[in-house]
Amino acid sequence: MVATASTCVLLDCGFSLKETVSRLARLDLCLEDLDAVLCTHEHSDHAKGVAPLARKSGIPLFMTQGTWLARDYGEVPDLQLIKNYEAFALGDLHIQPVAVPHDAREPAQFVFSEGSKRLGVLTDLGCVTPHIIAAYAECDALLLEANHDLDMLWEGPYPPSLKSRVASDWGHLNNQQALQLLESLISPRLQTVVLGHISQKNNHLDRVRAAVDGAGLVGAEHRMHYACQDEGFAWLEL
Ligand SMILES: [Zn+2]
Ligand SMILES: [Zn+2]
């Protein structure tokens, strides 16, 4: 969820309508407060709930053409296709889609800005490209994927083919990759970092914290937050 004084946007929805409404309530929000829903890519944990929500509330649903074609969403009252990763505005929010390597048809991650504030949201990518580093430079806050611990992934319950997929350049960032990326994005401006999309089967908060400690990112600890799948995280103000 990204909100300014006048605009409130939901980014992805992998939950049923009922679960979404109850999670919104935890943030003191209801469906009527939402101005739009954005969908990064067609994988169920991001896309399953976006169309039911758009139908119920009537708000616009933004996604790339590839994401739209890759899944049957049913009827969507106000579909807004993102073309060529071109930036767009929603109220006072400026939104820059960013292309990422992930095993989806046309995945987009996003950098949100309002006035001088910049928030980068970056999950579901298998590797880091120069384009990504440039797109996410000089953010005030970052939500970054630390999906798996490589040892836990190889020893874990996934079938071999899925393990390879997750670990590949088109899968997800592991803890070390996430921290290497963070190292290249750290600037005096970056005040808040949330590590999220943490796998429940192939990662553990202790491993993520250990990796953060091991990376020795100077002064970074006090601005680190961790998003867990059940509770998510509360509002963070920029
Ligand atoms: Zn995902
Ligand atoms: Zn995905």
Image (cartoon, helix red, strand yellow):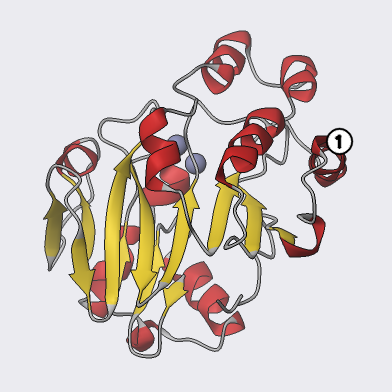
The spot of residue 76 in percent (x, y) is 16, 62
Residue of label 1: 214
- Mark 1 residue element: helix
Q: In terms of depth relative to the viewer, which is nearer, 168 or 202?
A: 168
Q: Is residue 154 visible?
A: yes
The amino acid pointed to by label 1 is Gly
Q: Quadrant of the C terminus?
A: bottom right
The residue sitting at 50% across, 44% down in the picture is 123
Occupied quadrant, residue 208: top right
The residue sitting at 42% across, 59% down in the picture is 13
Residue 124, above or below 39: above
Occupied quadrant, residue 89: bottom left
Occupied quadrant, residue 3: bottom left
Dot 1: few (<14), some (14–19), or many (≥20) neighbours within 10 Å?
few
Residue 167, above or below 219: above
Q: In terms of depth relative to the viewer, which is nearer, 65 or 48?
A: 65
Horizontal side of residue 96 vs 88, given as left or right: right
Horizontal side of residue 1 vs 167, given as left or right: left
Residue 5, above or below 57: below
The residue sitting at 42% across, 28% down in the picture is 129
Judged from the image, the quadrant occupied by ligand 2 is: top left
Q: Is residue 60 visible?
A: no
The spot of residue 149 in percent (x, y) is 74, 28
The spot of residue 181 in percent (x, y) is 58, 36
